């Protein structure tokens, strides 16, 4: 790495230069602390007394090589600031840290792990014309051991991959794994940006997890946090006695979450973050990154009224453009709640360079609709059609994430209107609506079996509820729906092309009915939704031509907990290409559309 590139925000491999690296003479330690008066390396091998690190000229880079440091030993930097401060910091570029409440970095030898996913990596793609059904997971609370302790990365690997595959998910998204001091931050307030959390084991253990998923045909995405960092004084805050990584002024320097905002106008900060993004993709073979809180980068404090943060926007563009060159097949996803334009347009065309953007408008409108009574739904009927008015402006992904299952919001199933028994049929119909709506899919763990308790990072999911017939039936419904999504190309082929979608009914306010048609390369699918609590016999549907509808899935079949007997259904269009259907309350039906060729 050239230091000039580091200073100017062009470096993507700063982690090869900074941190602790093994050489023939021992371990070479480097840290960047331009505002420091002096820096000591303290560790287990010198009884934490300290060895003086030398600055390379006036570069701000302090280094020391020692043969006494051995892999597995703990260390920190004792930094004396020009302001008279004296603080012990973990290594910003450290590859491993001790488990909280410990705060030291750990000397780590170069990995000798050999991946076996070469074929997967060669075939890796961004999935624009393929299925992308993402299962979002917090590793510490997906499953736990009988004594309440965490499983390791290696222990989770085959179980999690098999579960995702069995239930029709072809991607897993892991909530942040960078080292963090507080479990309750879920990994979104980091101290060790290059260190996989020690909660679940070692960096090579994480490599094994990703490798295992790839061997079983499941991609793995990682949450990445380029916006802010933890306040803990052993981390990045006031690293060299000055605001090196953060803004010096609290009005823009502190986030709404009580963390420090990165100052993206500094080239060294940009190099740190984009090197970190490259590190996770390169060293662990993640298939992509979901970048958290992008709105806080686009606008000052995430508030459009305060104006665009142009330095942060340029950082995003430079990072995404660089990652695209280094990892052309990796998937870059923005969690962005704003209407900032061209989030998923290429950087060379003035865009931000992401591949997908979370459609939080769809999420909010849809969940709000399903909270309402059937009578209220008539007056807000077009909350479910509005998303298609803007859908083709970006490459959208439909998220039902952890954020919709915590902090008093209730789980997705619990959000459904009505009493316990009413929630399940509505949720079954809701999830078919989600699958039929264009856009990639993301669902948070526990939703697949209808968890009713809000997520708690300190507990595993409520797996025992799967013993109850209604939850077991719901799990089997989601599983079958997910597998239909993966096997029928009309769900995803050309989904960002308006020619592949049409409403067949989006003007039945009084009945709360909707009908969509999706066209793939080989087939067409039609889904009929009825979100009222009253049965509607004799529903008349006008088709775009003559043909047949063959029923693939009914949300109200008895084996899913509904009332309808399962039977083979083929409906043929009559005069004026009309079809007549019976619509049970709170139901959805999925059909394969078989057109009759013109004679």
Image: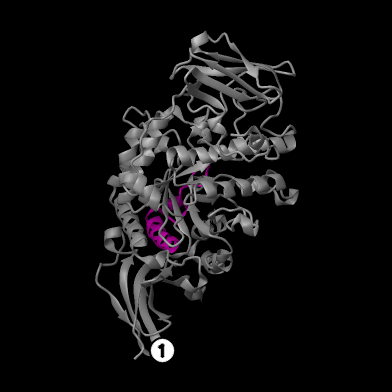
Tell me if mark 1 has few (under 14), some (14-19) or many (20+) residues whose alpha carbon lies within 10 angstroms of its own: few
Name the residue at 33% across, 62% down: 487
Q: Is residue 115 left or right of residue 289?
A: left
Q: Quadrant of residue 483?
A: bottom left
Taking the magenta stretch, the answer to whether it contains residue 35 is no
The number of numbered discs placed on residues in the rendered structure image is 1
Establish if 367 lies above or below 404: below
User: How far across and how far down the image is residue 22, in percent?
Assistant: 48, 23
Pick out the residue farthest to the front: 24
The residue nearer to you, when weighing 24 against 194, is 24
User: How far across and how far down the image is residue 573, in percent?
Assistant: 35, 84
Judging by the rendered image, the residue that carries numbered circle 1 is 576
Q: Which residues are magenta?
A: 406-435
Name the residue at 62% across, 55% down: 347
User: How far across and how far down the image is residue 371, in percent?
Assistant: 50, 57
SS assignment at label 1: helix
Q: Is residue 5 left or right of residue 402?
A: right
Q: Quadrant of the C terminus?
A: bottom left
Q: Dominant secondary structure of the magenta stretch? A: helix
User: How far across and how far down the image is residue 97, in percent?
Assistant: 49, 24
Name the residue at 33% across, 66% down: 554
**Residue 129 in view (yes/no):** yes
């Amino acid at each position: 790495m050239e230091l000039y590139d580091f200073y100017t925000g062009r470096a993507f491999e700063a982690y090869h230069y900074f941190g602790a690296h093994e050489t023939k003479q021992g371990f070479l330690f480097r840290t960047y602390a331009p505002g420091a008066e002096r820096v000591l390396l303290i560790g287990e091998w010198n009884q934490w007394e300290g060895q003086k690190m030398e600055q390379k000229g006036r570069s701000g880079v302090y280094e020391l090589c020692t043969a006494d440091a051995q892999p597995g030993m703990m260390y920190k930097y004792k930094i004396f600031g020009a302001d008279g401060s004296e603080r012990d910091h973990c290594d910003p570029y450290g590859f491993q840290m001790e488990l909280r409440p410990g705060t030291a970095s750990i000397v780590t030898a170069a990995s000798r792990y050999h991946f076996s996913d070469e074929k997967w990596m060669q075939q890796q793609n961004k999935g624009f014309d393929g299925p992308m059904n993402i299962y979002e997971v917090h590793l510490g609370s997906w499953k736990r051991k009988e004594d309440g302790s965490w499983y390791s990365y290696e222990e989770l690997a085959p179980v999690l991959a098999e579960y995702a595959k069995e239930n029709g998910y072809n991607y897993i998204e892991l909530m942040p794994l960078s080292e963090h001091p507080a479990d309750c931050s879920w990994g979104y307030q980091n101290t060790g940006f290059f260190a996989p959390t020690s909660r679940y084991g070692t960096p090579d253990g994480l490599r094994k997890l990703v490798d295992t998923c790839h061997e079983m045909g499941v991609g793995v995405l990682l949450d990445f946090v380029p916006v802010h960092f933890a306040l803990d004084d052993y981390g990045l805050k006031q690293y060299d006695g000055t605001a090196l990584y953060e803004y010096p002024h609290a009005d823009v320097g502190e986030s709404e979450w009580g963390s420090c905002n990165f100052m993206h106008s500094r080239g060294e900060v940009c190099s740190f973050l984009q090197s970190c993004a490259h590190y996770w993709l390169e060293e662990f073979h993640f298939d992509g990154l979901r970048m958290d809180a992008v709105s806080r980068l686009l606008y000052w404090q995430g508030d459009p009224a305060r104006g665009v943060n142009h330095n942060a926007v340029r950082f995003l563009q430079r990072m995404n453009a660089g990652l695209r060159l280094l990892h052309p097949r990796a998937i870059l996803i923005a969690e962005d709640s704003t209407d900032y334009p061209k989030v998923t347009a290429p950087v060379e065309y003035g865009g931000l360079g992401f591949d997908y953007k979370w459609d939080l408008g769809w999420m909010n409108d849809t969940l709000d609709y399903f909270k309402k009574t059937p009578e209220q739904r008539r007056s807000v009927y077009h909350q479910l059609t509005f998303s298609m008015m803007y859908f083709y402006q970006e490459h959208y992904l439909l998220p039902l994430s952890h954020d919709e299952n915590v902090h008093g919001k209730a789980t997705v199933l619990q959000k459904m209107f009505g009493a316990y028994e009413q929630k399940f049929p509505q949720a079954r119909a809701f999830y078919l609506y989600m699958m039929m709506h264009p856009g990639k899919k993301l669902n948070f763990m526990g939703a697949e079996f209808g968890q009713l308790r809000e997520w708690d990072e300190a507990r595993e999911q409520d797996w025992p509820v799967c013993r109850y017939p209604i939850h077991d039936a719901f799990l089997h419904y989601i599983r079958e729906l997910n597998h239909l999504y993966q096997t029928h190309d009309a769900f995803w082929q050309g989904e960002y092309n308006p020619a592949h979608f049409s409403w067949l009914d989006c003007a039945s306010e009084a009945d709360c009915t909707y009908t969509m048609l999706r066209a793939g390369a080989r087939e067409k699918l039609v889904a009929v939704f009825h979100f009222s609590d009253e049965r509607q016999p004799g529903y008349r549907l006008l088709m775009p031509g003559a043909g047949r509808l063959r029923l693939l899935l009914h949300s109200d079949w008895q084996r899913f907990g509904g009332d309808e007997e399962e039977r083979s259904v083929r409906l043929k269009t009559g005069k004026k290409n009309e079809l007549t259907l019976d619509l049970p309350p709170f139901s959805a039906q999925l059909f394969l559309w078989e057109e009759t060729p013109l004679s």
